[in-house]
Amino acid sequence: MDVGLGVLDHPNTRKIHSPPTPFLVSITVYLGYLVGVFLYSFSPLLHKDLLLILSAATMLLVVGILDDAGFLHPQIKLMVAMPVAALILILFYLNLKIFSVNLVNYFFTIFWVVGITAAYNLLDGMDGLSTGVCVIASFFYFIIGFIADDSFLVS
């Protein structure tokens, strides 16, 4: 898709790849995610949380595309990503339940989501690495969800 449209990421001092590579691969990954959400939507186990995560993913996709296109400075991206993560996580009570104090759980979850997103973005300059890390992480989320009998995490 990117090659046909001429939307390629050309190598520079920040990039490790040598040939120009597709630029909007994130849209393809997002579309794959949408297919999974669509298939899961027929399940009686559909969680409202899945749609909320889809909303957050959509907002972060837009931020990522603007960042990849060079329209966002890293600090601005962080100032957008943090409130998006906070809004979705707090409004819909999504948080890692690690500590006994709920407020601490929310802050830790926001830090986790924004931190993982930023760390993953650092891998983006290395051709293929971000995809491999995503596949490995998804596999382990599936295994953990399967063992914990958590259909939401498995999906």
Image (cartoon, rainbow, N blue to C red):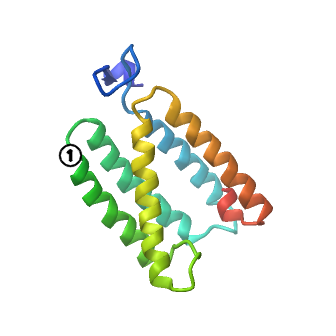
- Residue displayed at 34% across by 45% down: 64
Residue 128: x and y in percent read: 51, 28
Secondary element type, mark 1? loop
Q: What crowding class fits label 1: few (fewer than 14 Cα within 10 Å), some (14-19), or many (20 or more)?
A: few
In the rendered view of the protein, which quadrant contains the N terminus?
Answer: top left
- Residue displayed at 47% across by 58% down: 54
Q: Can you say whether 90 is above or below 119 in the image?
A: below
- Left or right: 17 with respect to 76? right
Q: Nearer the viewer, residue 66 or 78?
A: 78
Q: Which residue is mark 1?
A: 73
- Rendered image quadrant of residue 107: bottom left
- Residue displayed at 69% across by 57% down: 154
Residue 28: x and y in percent read: 47, 36
- Amino acid on which the number 1 mark rests in the picture: His
Residue 116: x and y in percent read: 46, 53
In the rendered view of the protein, which quadrant contains the C terminus?
Answer: bottom right
Residue 105: x and y in percent read: 50, 77
- Left or right: 13 with respect to 26? left
- Left or right: 146 with respect to 36? right
